[in-house]
Image (cartoon, rainbow, N blue to C red):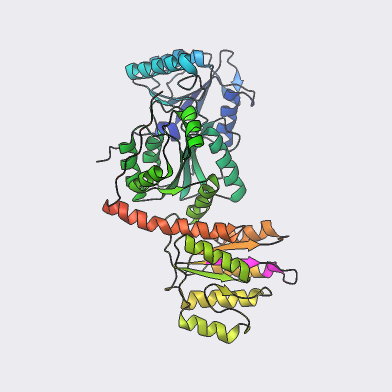
Amino acid sequence: MVMSPPDLSPFFAPRSIAVIGAGERATSSGGAVMQMLQRAAYGGRVVPVNPRGGNIFGYEAVTSIAEINPPVETAVIVIRPDAILDAVGECADRGIRNVLILPGGFAEAGPAGVARNAALLRLAAERGVTVAGPNCAGIVHLDPKWRFAATFLRDLPPGAEADGLAFVSQSGALAEEFIDKANARALPLTSVVSVGNAVHLGVEDYLAWLGERPEIGAALLYVESIEDHERFREVARKVAAAKPVIALFGGRTDVGGRAASAHTGAIANDDAAIDAFCASCGIIRVESLRRLLVAAKAFGRFPQGLGRRTLILSNSGGPGVICADRAALEGLELGALPQAMADVLRQQLPPEASVANPIDLLADAREDRFGLTFEAAMTHAHQAYDMVLMIHVVPFMVDAGPVIDRLAELARGARLPVMHSMMGTLPGKADWFASMERAGVPMFNDVEEMAEAAGLLARYPIVRDSARRDTLPTAVFHDRKRR
């Protein structure tokens, strides 16, 4: 039976915080945290702690932890490592029981750091303090109802009104990269967690809490090491029964495994072991950061996944073939067109067009041909397929603007989920992509990524149903080695 997850609200949605080591200089750790709190429009009480006092980012500072009155819910610690243990003790004295420690200098930092880590664990146990981190980049949670960001990462993710994505990472650098790509690709990233050394809270703890949040539609993970593989499996299964869990595991090669061991103390695992473990957890595994970002694009729009039956609608033969190949390799089914739809298309498309799956409308297709085919699919094929993958190549003699306008208009009322890829030289790319995205259509730069996204979406309903029946296989995965 899965244990109830610890209440991590103090780390994701505290009503009051102290920033121990706060400063005015945005390039300092304490200044960066203060700046990001403001950028996130955090609405709670903020108490900067700095020996000099004064006004910091518009908040009146206190000169010591003992002056925090009344006590805050959570303390964010951004001071030098050798002063952190004293600060944690002072927090406990002041009645502050939740601390987020960003600096390193603990288990990752040689014998002195290992000793400091052990002392932190003893102190926290004796004083009833819960520690997030240390050696992490912080936590961002942009719940529309209560936005929070305690981090020195450079930017905030876009957030989402509903069905947002959460990214839990054992690498702060990948957290930074994921935020950057989320902003560039309009991914609805709401939560970002840099796990750090995880003296108390590991990936599974964050996953368990985020898995129960209504504002989160899917969870993405970067994992190098797991301390308690049985608990991780139980948590992942429970979450996967309700929403997708997609993971990238680092250290799957000999070289990568040695690097992961140096980074997090992981024991090397081969591909087969990781595959088996992910299957036993109900996790959709990806094998590259690129593919994790593809999954983010897909599940950010369709958090409950899609079926396997796929219609490819293209205006170019070659890209249609490549898309069909990748779709087949992803396990998608490209069934024949329903007869009624085929009849309509044969009557109204040019004789050179290919009335099959993939459909080829020919390169000179304009909004009338695209619109006709789209409407025929929605009228005659909405029960035959689970999704439509559209491919739009823009030749010099066709104005793509009216095509996009027509497709965006039709997509808003579509009876089937739609994804769209545009290829070639695209002078109006930013506007065209934005128009389709506003209509609820995920946009892709190439057809293979679109087909990969579709394949990942098609995996989840199978995993979800198995997790709900608790029929997922069990498997052995090496435990994390404590450092």
- In the depicted view, which residue is nearer to us: 116 or 437? 116
Q: Is residue 200 magenta?
A: no
Q: Position of residue 434 (x, y in %)?
A: 63, 57
Residue 55, quarter of picture: top right
The location of residue 410, given as percent across then percent down, is 56, 70
Task: Tell me which segment is drawn in magenta.
Answer: 389-402
Quadrant of the image containing the N terminus: top left
Residue 209 left/right relative to 380 = left
- The residue sitting at 51% across, 47% down in the picture is 292
Outermost residue, bottom direction? 347
Residue 211 in which image quadrant: top left
Image position of 145 with respect to 392: above or below: above
Residue 213: in sight, yes or no? no
Q: Nearer the viewer, residue 244 or 148?
A: 244
At horizontal 45% and vertical 73% (from top left) the residue drawn is 335
Indicate the quadrant containing the C terminus: top left, top right, bottom left or bottom right.
top left
67 vs 21, nearest the viewer: 21
Q: Is residue 12 left or right of residue 238?
A: right
Quick check: can you spot residue 38?
yes
Q: Is residue 63 above or below residue 227?
A: above
